[in-house]
Amino acid sequence: MGFKHILWDEADGVATLTINRPDRLNSLDMDVLAEMIEAVDRIRDGLSPARCLVLTGAGRGFSSGADLSSGGAGAAMGDGPVDAGKVLETHFNVLLERLFALPVPFVTAVNGPAAGAGCSYALAGDIIVAAKSAYFLQAFVNIGLVPDVGSTWMLPRMVGRARATRMMMLGERIPAELAYEWGMVSEVVEDADLLPRAQAIAGKLAKGPTRALTLIRSGIRDCLDRTLTEALMLERRNQMAAGRSPDFAEGVQAFLQKRPAEFSGK
């Protein structure tokens, strides 16, 4: 498992994926995305013992988005026009869906710019910790494209239609403190505290009831698009699944015995 464009670390139940192209503000091309997908699939396929994932960027930025210099925004269609959606289908969207479908909690540690696709991946976290230097940017309009990698699905749900439309149509930077006010991020910390804080949160999640946490992360997203009755039915199914887990039995015993629970992640 030798990676060229990312760093991958596993310790104490936490896997940390660091986009490692600091000289290019961690811009994303197909090679970077392929490595990120391969790393995330280690958790999906049970090849990693991690019970939580942290995603961050090396250097002074989380990710500046697609690497335009490498053709990351699209692929030529023979002698015809560029198909700016092709690489979404083959790489960018594949990674986003992998992150949403993770069987463990997912924390993002956002440093500096999170732009374009980088913004989407930053906002995909269950817990989003932003450094004071962080900012979020949807700058597609500046090059004549439309927001992608799930941003038109995620942002209106996070901040409302009016704010999402302004952010996308005007291409304005949203600094970390404003992102917190808007409900885009979970908390804002000093830059030096970013990774330690994200790792502390991930460490707590990694010791938690993984099955229940996974059902919480999927349940919240699923219920955003359902009626109340449908949401109640989904909660019913999820509660049945969680209630059959060994971690539920341990949690009840720990409560009755007035001791901290020791969850196994099963």
Image (cartoon, rainbow, N blue to C red):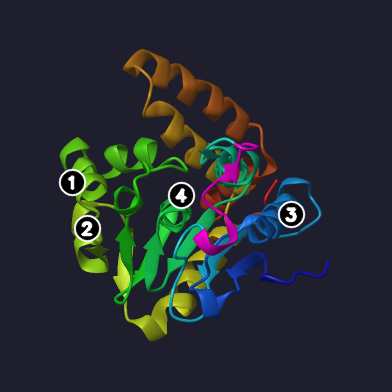
Q: Quadrant of the C terminus?
A: top right
Q: Mark 3 points at which residue?
A: 38
**Mark 3 vs mark 4, CA separation in Å:** 18 Å
> 256 or 78: nearer the eye?
78
Q: Could you say which quadrant of the image residue 248 lies in?
A: top right
* Whether residue 53 can be seen here: yes
Q: Earlier in the sequence, mark 3 or mark 1?
A: 3
Mark 4: amino acid: Ala
Per the rendered image, the range of residues in magenta is 68-79
Please name which of the two marks, 1 or 4, marks the residue nearer to the observer. Answer: 1
Residue at x 35%, y 52% (from the top left corner): 143
Q: Mark 1 points at which residue?
A: 166
Marker disc for residue 124 = 4
Helix, strand or loop under label 1 = helix
- Whether 204 is drawn above or below 243: the answer is below
Q: Mark 2 points at which residue?
A: 172
Residue at x 51%, y 36% (from the top left corner): 218
- Whether 59 is drawn above or below 88: the answer is below
Q: Do the residues labelled 1 and 2 touch (CB within 8 Å)?
A: yes
